[in-house]
Image: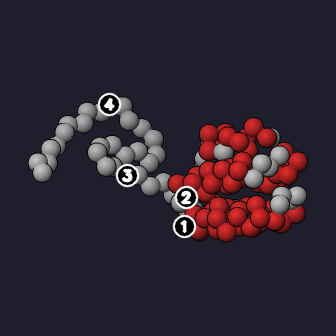
Amino acid sequence: MKKSSGNIRTRDISGSGIAVGHGARANVRIGGEAAQKEMADLVAQLRHDITTSSLAPGAKSVLERGPVQDLEVAARGGDKGGVEGALKRANDTLEAAGATAEHVSGLAQTLVKIASAAGVGFKVTAPYLAALL
């Protein structure tokens, strides 16, 4: 198989985590130690919100085993992309469970805080939950 190379031209690029080119990747880390501590505290609050919510036990279990564990790992490593992915999975899980605003109000507010702390757009990442707020 013949390999080809291409030329990429750019102008005026600024920002954080920019990757340019075929197969390029960029990793963005969440702030320092204080930011990671804040994320850990928010994930602990999220666990509490899930426990006290009126969600069905099965939905609580799925959230705990999936998105919440993923958020903990991402928060420890300061991984913004990991936080974004976990928020998307939480959104999808709650949508599939048919969660209503009364089921998730506190939980959704904590997820908004997590998104904000990570610099992730909540309305784009978790549109179902954003619509419930």
Ranked by sequence position, the earlier of labels 2 and 1 is: 1
Ranked by sequence position, the earlier of labels 2 and 4 is: 4
Give the Cα separation between the discs numbered 3 and 1.
Answer: 18 Å
Mark 3 and mark 2 in contact? Answer it, CB < 8 Å: no
Q: Position of residue 109 (x, y in %)?
A: 79, 49
Residue that mark 1 sits on = 77
Ranked by sequence position, the earlier of labels 4 and 1 is: 4
Q: Is residue 51 placed above or below 10 in the rendered structure?
A: below
Q: In what element is the residue under mark 4?
A: loop
Ranked by sequence position, the earlier of labels 3 and 1 is: 3
Nearer mark to the viewer, of 2 and 4: 2
On residue 11, which mark appears? 4
Amino acid tagged 3: Arg
Nearer mark to the viewer, of 3 and 1: 3
Identify which residue is drawn at 14% across, 48% down: 3
Give the Cα separation between the discs numbered 4 and 1.
Answer: 32 Å
Residue that mark 3 sits on = 25
